[in-house]
Image: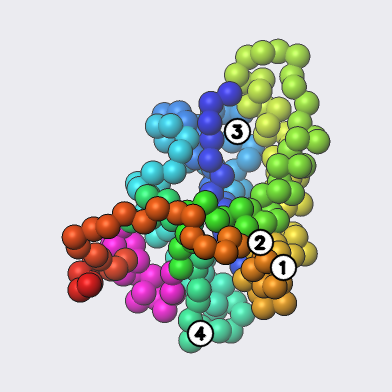
Amino acid sequence: MPNATLVAGIAADGFSLPSVVLWPSANLPKELTTLLTPSLDIWPNTNGWMDKTAFKKYALTVLLPAIIDRRKRILKETHRCLLLLDSHSSRADPTIWRQFKDAEIDVFTFVPHTTHILQPLDRGAFAVLKTKLSNNYSSPSSTSSSSKRTAVADVLPQALHTAFTPSVIKKAFVNSGVLSNGSGSVLMKLPQSSQYFIPSHSQYFDLFGKEITK
């Protein structure tokens, strides 16, 4: 089957934000329409990978509204929010982050190649998701693409439900070290010195496009 990407968001209180599947086709296959719910949408795109266009759409039409709505629901509209992201190149769009800044949302990106240690999604929810999919998926007797899509659609909802339960999400934040009572075990796994090459640049800019003097 072609590559597809699951875009998901979780909060430290155990809440899961609406998810999106980036599906590599011009149109949504009919076998996948059964997956469409308020908590899961499917966006056809050219290759199934996250790119700047897809991320901007997700950030501004799903992620930002969901964060604002969540703060209202828990009666913390005046509180700042911390958003944790990996450092994929699709995030490099200052027009997105100006809107998050205006909404009192601080953004932090992980050092490359550390998300398997530091990102809550990788430290819990996605592991459970992959396990459930692997255990419950049955290869169809037919080798057609439509049969394979149907087989995936049959098992994905329950796998997502299990992976994004509050208990799994909260444990993932502890395992990642984002919550204070879980930081010790994570810090023990970090390298003693940086192993990542940082290229030099003649100019530096922050997330909002402002030049930084070095």
Residue farthest to the bottom? 78
Q: Earlier in the sequence, mark 2 or mark 4?
A: 4
Asked whether the viewer can see residue 203, the reply is yes
Q: Secondary structure at mark 2?
A: loop
Q: Residues within 10 Å of mark 3 (few under 14, many from 20)?
A: some
Q: Earlier in the sequence, mark 4 or mark 3?
A: 3
User: Residue at image x 61%, y 80%?
Assistant: 74
Left of 4 or right of it: where is 162? right
The image's colour scheme reads: rainbow
The residue under label 3 is: 32
As measured in the structure, the alpha-carbon distance from the residue carrying label 1 to the one carrying label 2 is: 7 Å
User: Where does the C terminus fall, quadrant-wise?
Assistant: bottom left
Amino acid type for the residue under numbered disc 3: Leu
User: Residue at image x 51%, y 84%?
Assistant: 79
Label pair 4/3, CB-CB below 8 angstroms: no
Q: Secondary structure at mark 3?
A: helix
Q: Earlier in the sequence, mark 1 or mark 4?
A: 4
The residue under label 4 is: 79
Does the magenta segment cover residue 105? yes
